[in-house]
Image: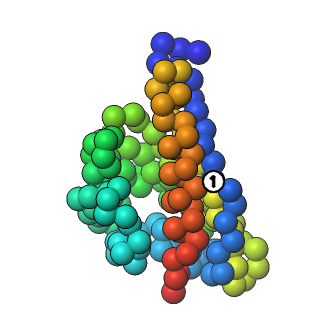
Amino acid sequence: MGLFGSESKFESSVKFVPYSQQAVYNNISDLNNLEKVRDRIPEDKVSDFSFDQDTVSLQVPPVGELKLRICDREEPKCVKFETVQSPVPFNVWVQVLPVDENNSKMKVTVKAELNPFIKSMVEKPLQDGVEKIADALAQVHYV
């Protein structure tokens, strides 16, 4: 373990999505599609929510401003994000795998370098957050 801690990984459970892998990928790989979920974001938990094709920015009390950017697109199965602005640097992967031609499954993974003190404070909220992100993504209409 280094001075800054070790890599911590938080994974959502696998979510079933009643849309094709390509339809899901097409939507998550262009952040302008976040407009579809704007009304599902709890205003008491998130403010200053903005986005463009490659980046998303939001204020999360008490964490502060988070800004993520798509750093890799692996069509049609994965979109990877990295932090541009965050108190703790981390990466997010959204993986989409086909079940059949009209259905897919999805998993959200967050990896961060956390020292033991920080990890003990953020472990539960991060795991809950990853699960909530996956739940929200699984409920989107990908048409």
User: Mark 1 falls on what kind of element?
Assistant: loop
Residue 117 shown left or right of residue 109 in the figure: left
User: 11 or 91, which lies in front?
Assistant: 11
Crowd tier of the residue under label 1, counting other residues whose Cα lies within 10 Å: few below 14, some 14–19, many 20 or above: many
Q: Residue beneath label 1, please?
A: 12
Residue 99 falls in image quadrant: bottom right
Q: Position of residue 80 (x, y in %)?
A: 50, 53
Residue 58 shown left or right of residue 10 in the figure: left
- List the single residue furthest toward the front: 44
How many numbered marks, from 0 up?
1
- List the single residue furthest toward the right: 100
Q: Amino acid at mark 1?
A: Ser
Q: Residue at x 58, y 55 (%)?
A: 131
Q: Residue at x 37, y 52 (%)?
A: 69
Q: Position of residue 26 (x, y in %)?
A: 50, 74
Q: Split into 4 quadrants, where in the image is the N terminus?
A: top right
Q: Residue at x 63, y 48 (%)?
A: 11
Q: Residue at x 53, y 21 (%)?
A: 116
- List the single residue furthest toward the left: 48
Above or below residue 109? Residue 105 is: below
